[in-house]
Image: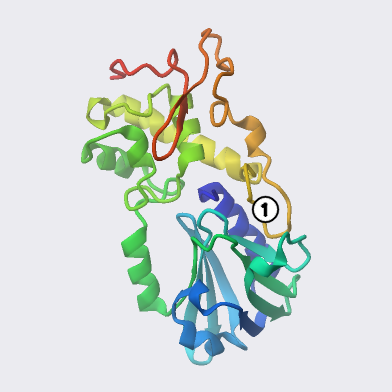
Amino acid sequence: MPELPEAEVVARQIRARLLGAQMTDVWIGREDIVREGYATASWYRGATLQSVDRYGKSVVLGFVNRQGRRYVVAELGMTGLLLFQSAPTKHPQHVHVRLSFEGGHEPELRYWNPRRFGRLSLLDKDGLDRYRIRRFGLDPISVSQQDFVRLLQERRGRLKALLMHQQAIAGIGNIYANEILFRAGLHPDHQISRLSVRKVETLYVIMREVLDEAIKHGGSSVRDFFAPDGSEGQYKRRHLVYGKEGQPCSNPCGGVIQRLRGERSSFFCPRCQSLRSKR
């Protein structure tokens, strides 16, 4: 947490409330919260927020001034949040960056991150390009079906691991990988090489449906996620398998949701998601 839907919700709220606003000040409470470009922080004072984008689980703010264009890349990590000043903030000592604005609908955007697994990067265009190439694979809500099929045909190994491999498919984490695979009727350990093109095409459609629905409902506030305005994502109410170990399957199969423990736990129905061939 957060994953792609949550990052997309963040980007859309910032775009709606701050696009076109001018940054008046940058306060950085911890130098180590900036992964790259700390010395360029003063460049952003007086710059205008011209774009807000999402790459994988990261939110990218694009600024322009007379000198050119630069970016603030916010990695949300496991516990990172971008919050407006108006949003209630638990443990304010974990607000490590404050970006002040005028001319927008919010006076301040804060970067809150208690465990500091995520960082900010202050980058020029070349730096952003390198960052994207190094970190992000195909975007699951914009990739074409043809490119998605081609990617899976070129890969081997377990299906869930691929869905969560950020350099292959950017933005899907444990929550949505579990939900997508359940709806597709595929076991988390299913071998990619055993999937037919038809099944991969079905997986593509379901992946898009799950992510789009999650965005529509504000993402999933399972632990610490809040949107910039402080609201909680309601898609957690629609989870069918994630965190539901021991509960009856939502399908009329008579199965019970099981949990596979590993580096990241998998939740699945052994009846609906058999490891037998799904060709």
Is residue 267 visible from the viewing direction of this image? yes
Give whichever of 93, 179 is nearer the camera: 93
| Res. 265 image quadrant | top left
Q: Is residue 164 left or right of residue 267?
A: left
Residue found 44% across the figure and 81% down from its top: 37
Disc 1 crowd rating (10 Å Cα; few below 14, some 14-19, many 20+) is: many
Kindly identify the amino acid type of the residue bearing the numbered disc 1.
Phe
Give the side of residue 118 with respect to residue 273, left or right.
right
Q: Dividing the picture into quarters, in which one does residue 274 lie? A: top left
Residue 68 versus residue 224: which sits nearer the camera?
224
Relative image position of residue 247 (x, y in whole percent):
59, 18
Quarter assignment of residue 35: bottom left
Quarter of the picture holding the C terminus: top left
- Which residue in the structure is indicated by mark 1? 226
| Residue 145 shows in the view | no
Q: Is residue 271 above or below residue 111?
A: above
Q: Is residue 131 above or below residue 233?
A: below
Q: How is the image coloured?
A: rainbow
Q: Is disc 1 placed on a helix, strand or loop?
A: loop
Residue drawn 33% across the image and 30% down it: 200
Can you give x and y, in whole percent of width and height, for residue 97 in the image? 61, 74
Q: Position of residue 80 (x, y in %)?
A: 57, 59
User: Residue 142: where, in percent of width, then height?
Assistant: 44, 49
Q: Residue at x 55, y 50 (%)?
A: 2
Q: Is residue 47 above or below residue 177?
A: below
Q: Count every numbered label the image shows and give the total.
A: 1
